[in-house]
Amino acid sequence: MVIVITGPTAVGKTDLSLFLAHKLNGEIINADSTQIYKGLDIATNKVQDTEGIKHYLFNEKDLRDDYSVFDYQKDAREIIDDILKRGKVPILVGGTGLYINAALYDYKFEAKVNAEYEGVSNDELYKMLLEVDPNTTIHLNNRVRVISALNYYKANGKPYSEKEKDMNLLYDTIFIGLTTDREILYYKINKRVDKMVEEGLIEEAKEVYDLGIRSKAVMTPIGPKELFDYFDGNITLEEAIDLIKNKSRKYAKRQYTWFRNQMKLKWFTTNYDDFSKTEEEVLKYINKKMSK
């Protein structure tokens, strides 16, 4: 059995995954596209205390490396198979839904085919996607996902938006989604950004800025690129922090849309006042599902 813990940022995915790993003899596989890279620990909100639980696909790649969903699919499946062979429970944790689906469902991606899109504008790419997938829900400015959808069509001969109709799970899987009231979530996101700043987000970003690294791993997560604008003198620090909060809230909204359109989750509401109640509620549900 494989367990998935997902949901928008700041809903408690990490804490729940650690709790379940202790209770279910589990090991944790990262399913966040930004946490695979070394560095930017604060910006990507990596788990700091693993509580003795084995974690995979964290801090695996250099910030200069190119790591795609194709690579993740291959690596995650190998790890899942190994964990299952050892009689343990793989727990995929993160908010990158495309990575989760790539690991668990029977469909394939082409490797290293993005070079052909260099120099092609977002508008042109989106028109190409609409020609093969008129029902797509991907935003035209989400270049990475647009290219992934084009590659999916090339590899599978069918639109990415229709994949759910005939996707087959490779593993028995329990899908858990954590959620909360939108206003509460936005409040938690704002407070998290404030805490990240207190913990050294600005200093962390400045180290990478001074190294001159502007790779996908650096420019994708929210935080570094906004602070780079501050370092360049284009905006004030206050404006950069406000941008980080605003973009984080918008990202959470997009995550919700994706999860509800692309994943079949059992949703649980996070109890921030007593998170142990959320943990026990999820554990009870999982135990019931696993006993069937």
Image: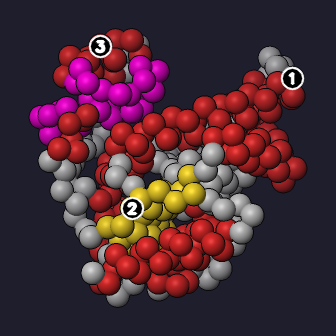
Q: Badges 1 and 2: C-beta atoms under 8 Å apart?
A: no
Residue that mark 3 sits on: 127
Relative side of 133 to 93, left or right: left
Residue that mark 1 sits on: 236
Amino acid found under the numbered disc labelled 2: Phe
**Camera-nearest label, 1 or 2:** 2
Residue that mark 2 sits on: 175
Helix, strand or loop at mark 2: strand
Q: Is residue 260 above or below residue 273?
A: above
* Residue 144: in magenta span: yes
The numbered disc on residue 65 is none
Q: Which residues are magenta?
A: 133-159
* Residue 23: in magenta span: no
Q: Residue at x 79, y 29 (%)?
A: 242
In front here: 280 or 40?
280
Q: Reading the chain from its start, which is encountered first: label 1 or label 3?
A: 3
Q: Residue at x 27, y 81 (%)?
A: 292
Residue 11 coordinates in the image, percent (x, y): 62, 55
Q: Is residue 158 above or below residue 289?
A: above
